[in-house]
Image (cartoon, grey):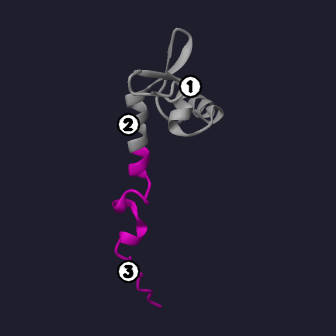
Amino acid sequence: MHDQSTPTHDAAFLNLTKAAKYLGISPNTLYVWRHRRQGPPSFRMGGRVMYRISSLDEWITVQEQADSRSNAALNPLSQKPMKRAVRTL
């Protein structure tokens, strides 16, 4: 049996409330991000704000890669220490 309240990949688009649930954030946060032109891409369809599930997944991947905890190349602890500049008096 499938839970009707959980978004599935069977639907190509989610409204703002369902997209927020899919991302694990509040609808208000997603609404604010949209108006600040932050967050995942959205569009209007029939007067409603919609999110493509594939775009949400892509956006999540970009967020993971931009986080130094998920991307070793960005982790400052994996970088070689910088040499100090030699001061001459």
The answer to whether residue 37 of the structure is visible from this angle is no
Residue sitting farthest toward the front: 1
Q: Is residue 23 left or right of residue 72?
A: right
Secondary structure found at label 3: loop
Label 1: how many Cα within 10 Å (few below 14, some 14–19, many 20+) = many
Q: Is residue 77 above or below residue 8?
A: below
Q: Is residue 50 magenta?
A: no
Tell which circle, 3 or 1, labels the residue nearer the N-terminal end. Answer: 1
Q: Residue at x 41, y 49 (%)?
A: 64
- Position of residue 57 measured from the top left corner of the image (x, y, whole percent): 40, 36
Pinpoint residue 3: horizontal percent, then vertical percent: 50, 28
Identified at 44% across, 89% down, the residue is: 88
The reply to whether the magenta stretch includes residue 63 is: yes
Residue, disc 3: 83
Please name the residue that numbered disc 2 is placed on.
Answer: 58
Mark 2 touching mark 3, by CB under 8 A? no
Residue type (three-letter) at the residue carrying disc 2: Glu
